[in-house]
Amino acid sequence: MTVKWHKTLPFPCHYALATEDELKEWCTKKKVPFPVIPKDNVGSTLNFGGYFVILVQKHKKQWDLVDTIIHESVHIHQGILSYVGETVVGDELEAYQIAAIATNLLRDSKCLT
């Protein structure tokens, strides 16, 4: 198991979709503490200093998983802007960045081929 990281350009950030086991393995390798994750959340976005990880619980329906990934992709976008110190972003840049993040993560989740 390994976490597949995507780089955001031009920002110095990365993001990934991971299982809890994959994230634990990554945290151990990077020597960072594993965060407390609320068990009742269907999805969580975690920030490790410019490395953003979405943890998604198992979903019964594919469209519920799609909804969660898109929702958490917005949080990654917001986290990236905060990380690089941006307070204002154009509507088009925002839309393209969120779409790119969501598409990459949906592909990783096998929702898209």
Image (cartoon, rainbow, N blue to C red):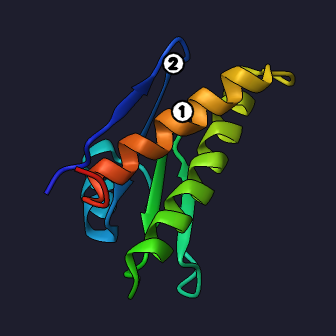
Q: Is mark 1 on a helix, strand or loop?
A: loop
Amino acid type indicated by mark 2: Pro
**Residue 50, numbered circle:** 1
Residue at 55% x, 66% y: name it: 67
Q: Does residue 8 appear to the left or right of 92 in the view shown?
A: left
Name the amino acid type tagged 1. Answer: Gly
Image quadrant in which you'd find residue 68: bottom right
The answer to whether residue 10 is above or below residue 112 is: above
Quadrant in the picture for the N terminus: bottom left
Q: Residues within 10 Å of mark 1 (few under 14, many from 20)?
A: some
Q: Which of marks 2 and 1 is nearer the N terminus?
A: 2
Instruction: Label 2, secondary structure: give it.
Output: loop
- The residue at the point 56 percent across, 55 percent down is 70
Q: Which mark is residue 12?
A: 2
Pointers 2 and 1 in contact (C-beta within 8 Å): yes
* Whole-percent x, y for residue 76 in the image: 59, 43
